Image (cartoon, grey):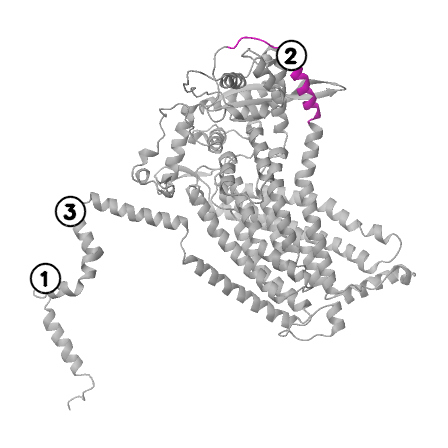
Amino acid sequence: MSDEQDRPLRFLRSWALERRQRQAGDSDGEAHAPLAGYADFVLSFRHTGPAADAQAALEDVVKRLAHAGLSVEVRAAQCARRHGRSATFEAVAGQLLLFIECPRSRLEHEWSRSRLHDWLGGMVALRRGADGSLEVDSDAQDDPSRLIVHASDDPTAELISVSERQRLVQRLVTGAESEGGAAIGAADGVDAVVAMHDRRFNQRWLRHWGGKWLIDRQDLRRIREHFGDEVAMYFAFLQSYVLWLALPGAVGAAWWALGRSFSWQFGVLLVLWGVLFTETWARRQSDIATYWGVHGVERARESRRPEFRADRYVIDAATGERVPAFSGAQRWLRRLLGVPVVAALSLVMAVFIALIFALQTFLSEFYAGPFATVLGLAPAVLFSACLPAYTALCTRMAAALTNYENYEFEAEHAAQFTAKIFVFRFLQDQLYLFLTAWVFVPYRDVFGGWVHGAYSALSTDKAATLKFSATPAAELVQNMLTGFVVTSQLVGMATETGLPLVLRWWNSRSLAHASQVSTAAGNDHNHEASSISGTGNGHRHVLSNMLAVAPTGVDTWVESANDADAPADIQQQFVARVTEELALPEYTTFEDYAEMASQFGRVAFFSVAWPLAPLAALMNNWLELRTDAAKICSATRRPTPRRVESIGPWLDTLRFMCWLSSITNALLIYQFHSNCAFLPHADADAMQRFGRTSLSFALVVLLFSEHAFLAVRWAVTHVMASWPGAYARITERARAQSRRRWLDKAPSVLRDLAADTAGDLSQDAAGSLAADSDDASIGAGADWRAELELGCRAIACWGKPKAE
């Protein structure tokens, strides 16, 4: 091993010394000084070119990080190789790890800059009042200089939360150089900017959630402080969705027990439930953003996307600054060029799903030859094997198109990307069921004639291998829906959480064995401790959680050794674990929101066919709260904190599905409800095989249900608007307080005028006019008495005949 790799990492050495000193316990009772050696992020640097080019690229990255005010330590990536009962560490060729630290002074400056930017962007500064209620920070609103953070008199005081610290440091790493950042990205050879997992926090989190039924505000607060607003907002949405599913879940279970499928009462309940859920969540996410102090953060637009490429510079109308910009006309042209690409990809997916559907329908409804049971599994295998790969291709194309459109801010980019992906996800999740209910069932005899005719031309043994479709129409739709709901939930849980955990356990066996070897070596070290230069207070436990391979390893070295330098094998173990985490996939909330949106669509569209669908979704989502937490802790990289004030474009997606559910529920009830009084009577045999198939009456039902939905949504939104949300209440109270403070500081003449305007004139209007009746100034000097007499004479002439 080289001497360079033996050199101890500063923050690792500092963490060990601080932990040892804290464990020893100081008798003097003095506070420890904040330590500055905490590694905020790890950058993975890769370069496949010549060594000289790699060195030049690395030098450029390190210099830009240093100019941004960040400290950097470079080490070669390590991996553990298992050889029988022994294990060794080897350097990973072509990969370096850059450990990034942000000094406290730089962090204070960046935090002050962020708060001032929020104020300039129109965000309201909030604080907790004496009674614990949230109120506007009037001092900061009136005097922006109060937003500037100065060094605390108590050096051990926590500056900001872990997530806020990581957000600011990540902006320094990836932000534009014109905004004080280092502008590090993939073009510089850095393929990952990752914060390491806090293993102790993860263990406590999973243990705590595993022992309770529902999560509360304190749980969301801890998630927000550790992972940021975006992850916390997702869990808040998921918790709210779980609670709202209780109503249709209970009613659906009762309807299913009574055998009442395709009930119009349940259909009306589902549509009303969808409207109430989406509109109340819109209010709740606004209140949450207010309580978290991020209301308006998307409007403030804190920093541009690193991938944004400007084609010119313009003068900002509000600030007068020269800012980069991109032509709106050119962006619209690029969006239009992407439309045929998305349409072509969607058409190919629709044709593929239709072919799979036709094959499955043939094998399950018409084919009666040999190996019918085994062949019946072929469509499901093709669907599961081919469609996810094609969906991944469509996702990459959608990402490339959205990047080509060159959006300046993340909110715009996410909205356009979601709109493209929604088309593919909708076809993948819902087209199968639509084809079953409204293509095959009404025209099954036509398809049967085609199948028998084609088979007769190819084979003479028609009677032995073909049959006629005899499954009742309603049962066919119910079976298809049941299979989709149950299978998608089980497969989704296995692929999201189960399989990644198994793969990570398998890949980490060598590292675990090397950890045991390091433990034995760590017990042999016994040296003297020296000086301290460590991590920021409040973050010092993070390294212990990353490094702790309980109960030995680094813990044993810290507790028993006296040397300030970590043994080489323990440092190798730490670097190997960092390398292992960098190999994990990146976590984003996109896939989790997409899964919930797909499930919401199935519940809203087809629960009238299978009333247990909401209950199945409720049970799945209750588990999803725990499995998503486990996935974040063990199967993905640590999420990078990001400030959000809503669930983004997904709310519009849910609202669109609510509108569409008003149509699908009405059509399903019309087609398959057997004895509804206000629907036309149908022949029993035709009802069993096809349902009602009158297109004209179906169109009437569709239009009526869609307009009824619009009326209900209008009523719900207007009723909810009569109760102001938290943000409206707080800002209105702040405006009233601001007016009162202005009047206190205003000249006496203005105060008197404001008082007259506010109350005196309105309360004593009649008396004032009477008292001033002799004042010639009333009416701007006009003779109002003469005008009044003229008007009275005109009134007296009403109705009198004109003189000849």
Amino acid, disc 1 = Ser
Amino acid, disc 2 = Met
Q: Quadrant of the C terminus?
A: bottom left
| Rendered location of residue 130, percent (x, y) | 34, 39
Q: In the image, which residues are magenta?
A: 508-529
Q: Are marks 3 and 2 in contact (CB under 8 Å)?
A: no
Residue located at (64% from left, 45% from top):
394
Which of the 4 image quarters holds residue 248? bottom right
- Residue located beneath label 1 in the image: 777
Under circle 3, the secondary element is helix
Instruction: Using the numbered discs, state the Cα–Cα distance from disc 3 to disc 2 in whole angstroms.
Output: 81 Å
Instruction: Using the numbered discs, state the Cα–Cα distance from disc 1 to disc 2 in whole angstroms.
Output: 99 Å
- Direction right: furthest residue: 460
> Considering only order in the chain, which callout, 1 or 3, is on the residue closer to the N terminus?
3
Under circle 1, the secondary element is loop
Q: Nearer the viewer, residue 109 or 216?
A: 216
Is residue 340 visible to the viewer in this orientation of the structure? no
Tell me if mark 3 has few (under 14), some (14-19) or many (20+) residues whose alpha carbon lies within 10 angstroms of its own: few
| Rendered location of residue 619, percent (x, y) | 64, 49
Up/down of 537 relative to 409, above or below? above
Res 748 label: 3
> Considering only order in the chain, which callout, 2 or 3, is on the residue closer to the N terminus?
2
Magenta span dominant secondary structure: helix
Residue 75 counted in the magenta span: no
- Residue located beneath label 2 in the image: 1
